[in-house]
Amino acid sequence: MADLAANKKVARAYLELIAKGDADAVANLFADDGAIILQSETPLPPETKGRENIRGLIAQLTPLFPETGLKIIVDEMTAEEDRVAIMAHGDAIHVSGKPYRNKYHFLLTFRNGKIVKSYEYMDSLLMTNVFFGGAK
């Protein structure tokens, strides 16, 4: 049986560690075969699989938010079986000086206390405009 409270704690830590830019700690929350899957079409890779690749992805995002980190604030969280669902919003300043206030839905799946998959839904147009100046 899944430990729902423990999974929720890991899910919250995941978002807090992204904001801090701690790529090693984020990667260590994942199973060896874990993956971040972007469900929205963006210039970023749709799937980043494996701890080393996840570490690299987070390390690439960190310099984009030197003032605030990529701060993601949990609005609602629920857990059932091996899943944690999170509604969240961002409050960050991009390196360009533009505010980045995206809205998110994360669906995390767990195995033995580790994240196996992080499905991320967001406003991809906002992300593309802020991160890449609208380039597609």
Image: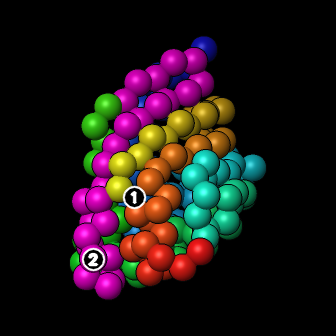
Mark 2 burial class by Cα count in 10 Å: few <14, some 14-19, many 20+: few
- The structure residue drawn at horizontal position 57% and vertical position 52%, both measured from the top left corner, is 40
In the image shown, does 114 or 95 lie closer to the viewer?
Answer: 95
Q: Percent position (x, y) of residue 82?
A: 59, 24
Image point 67% across, 65% down: which residue? 45
Which quarter shows the N terminus? Answer: top right
* Viewer-closest of 79 and 121: 121
Rendered location of residue 36, percent (x, y) = 62, 53
Q: Residue at x 48, y 69 (%)?
A: 128
Q: Which residues are magenta?
A: 77-101
**Horizontal and vertical percent for residue 63?**
41, 81
- Earlier residue among tags 2 and 1: 1
- Which one is in front in this view, the residue at disc 2 or the one at disc 1? 2
Q: Is residue 38 left or right of residue 9?
A: right
Q: Which mark is residue 17?
A: 1
- Left/right of residue 99 with respect to residue 44 in the rendered view: left
Q: Is residue 55 visible?
A: no
Q: What amino acid type is highlighted by mark number 1?
A: Leu
Q: Confirm whether the magenta stretch covers residue 78.
A: yes
Q: Helix, strand, or loop for circle 2?
A: loop
Q: Residue furthest bottom?
A: 96
Placement of 133 over or under 2, stated as above or below: below
Q: Secondary structure at mark 1?
A: helix
Q: Nearer the viewer, residue 106 or 56?
A: 106
> Is disc 2 in contact with disc 1, using a CB cutoff of under 8 Å?
no
- Residue 8: within the magenta? no
As measured in the structure, the alpha-carbon distance from the residue carrying label 2 to the one carrying label 1 is 22 Å
| Residue occupied by mark 2 | 98
